[in-house]
Image (tube, grey):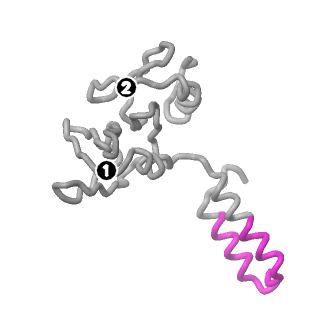
Amino acid sequence: MKPIDPDELIEAVNKAKNKPSSTDKQQVALLDETLLEYGNTKKSRQPNGTKRLVLNSAEGVHFVRLLDIIYCESMGSYTKFHLVGNKKIGVSKVLKEYEEILNDYYFYRVHQSDIVNLDQITKYVKGDEGQVWLSDNSEIEVSRRRKSEFLELLPEFYVNSSKID
């Protein structure tokens, strides 16, 4: 039944594969294919919760809670993490690498240069491009190209009493 719990689906597939009546290779292959297909099409994001991101910087290795990341800023071949408490960490990896990691959580790349933590947004300012205001009073532009997808994404994360446009 929908919504599908990934853990229950995996358990059900493994149970079916281990039953004597399910030893037929075609059935097992079909089950594996279904599980793989489900895993590849699953797009829901996971809450940031207590998950941590490991950041290797010149100063050392930082273990940063996802909730504490306000936004990530591209600095050419580096990425600067803006954290709660006005802390900043520079890492020698491009923003694209962190986009791939953070995409499964409450983060969204609103602009070529910025990924924002959806948990840290305090305000959205309408306009051609629009802007998000974050908990540290940063103002980040939302690119025209990403604006409609960003606005469609917001209702997933917020209790909404009116339409955002």
Residue closest to the far top: 127
Residue 73 place in picture, x, y as percent? 34, 37
Kindly tell me whether residue 32 is visible in this rendering: yes
Is 51 located above or below residue 96 in the figure? below
Residue 25 place in picture, x, y as percent? 81, 81
Please tell me which of labels 1 and 2 falls first in the chain: 1
Does 127 sit left or right of 84 as displayed? Answer: right
Residue 66 place in picture, x, y as percent? 35, 47
Residue 52: numbered disc: none
- The amino acid sitting under disc 1 is Arg
Residue closest to the far front: 76
Badge 1 is on which residue? 65
Q: Nearer the viewer, residue 113 or 77?
A: 77
Q: Nearer the viewer, residue 90 or 85?
A: 90
Classify the position of the C terminus by image quarter.
Answer: top right
Instruction: Classify mark 2: helix, strand or loop.
Output: strand
Count neighbours of disc 2 (C-alpha within 10 A) and say few if under 14, some if 14 to 19, many if 20 or more.
Answer: many
Name the residue located 43 percent from the left edge and 51 percent from the top edge: 97
Does 92 sit left or right of 18 as displayed? Answer: left
Does 121 sit left or right of 64 as displayed? Answer: right
Tell me if residue 22 is in the magenta stretch: yes
Is 140 located above or below residue 47 in the figure? above
Tell me if residue 113 is in the magenta stretch: no
Classify the position of the N terminus by image quarter.
Answer: bottom right
Kindly tell me whether residue 46 is visible in this rendering: no
Tell me if label 1 and label 2 are in contact, CB under 8 Å: no
Instruction: Classify mark 1: helix, strand or loop.
Output: strand
Residue stretch rendered in magenta on the structure: 9-33
